Image: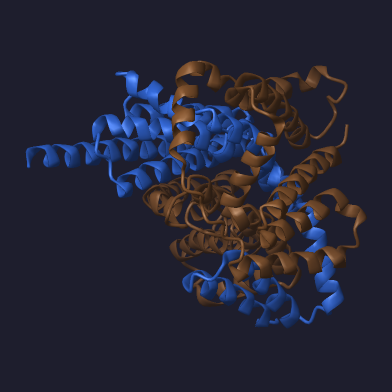
Chain colours: A brown, B blue
Amino acid sequence: MQIEYVFWLSGALLAACALHDLRAQRFAAAAFWGILAVVFIGGTALPTQAVGIGVIVLALIAGSGALRRVPEAVAPAAAEFRRASAARLGHKLFAPALLIPLGTLVLSLLQPYSPWAAADRVQFTLIALTVACIAATFAALWLTRAHPRHAVGEASRLLDALSWALLLPMLLAMLGAVFAATGVGEAIAHLVTAVIPTDSRAACLIAFAFGMVAFTVIMGNAFAAFPVMMAGIGMPLLIGQHHAHAAALGALGMLTGYCGTLLTPMAANFNIVPAALLELRDQNGVIRAQWPTALALLAFNVAMLWFFSLP
Amino acid sequence: MNYWPLLGVAVVVAGFVLRTNPALVVVVAGVVSGLLAGLPVPDLLALIGAKFVASRNLLVLLLTLPTIGLLERAGLREHAAAFIARMRTFTLARLLIAYLAVRQILSMLGLSGIAGHAQTVRPLLAPMAEAAAEKIDPALGAEARERVKALCAATDNTGLFFGEDVFIAFGAVLLIQGFYAQNGISLDPRSISLWALPTAIAAFVIQSLRAIRLQRALRRKAESRSAD
């Protein structure tokens, strides 16, 4: 059992969608998904520099605007087909959809009793999700009596609707690594510590909390912000100088960073991909729906930090 | 200290403000930051490629697409909507609060991967919420529809983020513990995850209130329209 199989399957699906786009003469989309399919199947066996060039080509295709697929006008016949099919199949339609989360749940609960009990839990969940997705695809094919080519056609329709947004989480992970390698984090922490009056508990706490939010907004990930802000402000000033409670500071500091995750387009898989999935007209619609929650929770976390983490 | 790589951050900010294609912005920012830090071009390309390959696991939602596409073609969204439209007790706010509770509890148990925007929000939650909103206001406008769908995604995110930190074996808790261990402070993961509980409760209350508020706003709009 290997995680590579999951990526090969993903790559095969991407390749099938690329062929589908090629036949429909959407050449930019065919090239885009084709390159991605090669990266998924080739994986670590490919020379990393070639992948780097591939990533730049993907970004150029996305930036050229050539991926935009004109949404086909919904044929009245198709809408009528969907209504009739919904009335005929009823609740049975929920079964394959629920099979994905429930199948994943059952398989991951079975892990301790399987031969792969020692495998990494996150990787195992990923494999469980893949198995559940395969089972659900067959269940959906059987239930709807659709031809397998419809599975590819429908996947391609959704893929072209998601378009470059699907790629953004991977690109941002890449950007995080480049920022880390080029010392962007240390430079920001350096600037922040240079301007705060370190004798004031309040100033240190506010700088820490807002540093977590700001850094998470920039990096799209609280995990990247945490070590930088802790090394810059948390350890030397709040714990070292002002004797803050370590467990409370760590937990609440991380959760303060999460408020930043709700606010940033850089957290693409949470904020931009769903906007594409739900076909929102505003790319930042999810962030617009989240900012009141984020600010209220930020105030709550800062109050918790002030009253409970400082002696 | 070399402050020049910070221009990569400036590229990101400028790109989002100018609404340039985000995929292009992110790659340009990486290249700018890398070149200004003095990384040789071959090393920079290798870094970009290696990290991109290493993050392939972020794209597994891909494998849900054939199922969801087939079911949508067979009328899943129409049926989810019709189902909620028939149920009197399932108002918009109750639907969203119930989903939030389930999502948050599953995340607290470490089962965060089983729901998500592709698996549950697009095929199930969003059409159900739209149908529940149509029960309040049969002439639901495009603007209101957009707000309802966006709040569905926001509810999923809030439940996930502020549930998973309560789970001891979750990455964030282990990251915090690991950071402290490197700096000579040894902590029990349970003491860390316990401190995440008050915020988890606050997140549930705040997000629930927002669902109720949206429901009230839709109701007021529908009433003011029928009063005209």
Q: Quadrant of residue A112?
A: top right
Q: In which quarter of the image is residue A6?
A: top right
Q: In which quarter of the image is residue A174?
A: bottom right
Image position, residue A221 (x, y; %): 61, 55
Question: How many numbered marks, from 0 up?
Answer: 0
Residue at horizontal 50 percent and vertical 28 percent from the top: B76
Q: Residue furthest left?
A: B228
Image position, residue A205 (x, y; %): 49, 60
Residue at horizontal 52 percent and vertical 59 percent from the top: A265
Image position, residue A10 (x, y; %): 76, 42
Q: Judge from the rendering whether residue A33 lies leftward or rightward of residue B228; answer left or right.
A: right
Image position, residue B123 (x, y; %): 52, 33
Front-most of residues B129 and B11:
B129
Q: Residue furthest front?
A: A77
Residue A87 vertical position relative to residue B170 in the rendered view, above or below: above
Q: Judge from the rendering whether residue B28 lies leftward or rightward of residue A195; answer left or right.
A: right
Residue at horizontal 83 percent and vertical 19 percent from the top: A114
Residue at horizontal 85 percent and vertical 42 percent from the top: A4
Q: Can residue A249 be seen in this view?
A: no
Identify the image quadrant of the N terminus of chain A: top right
Front-most of residues A138 and A275:
A138
Q: Is residue A167 visible?
A: yes
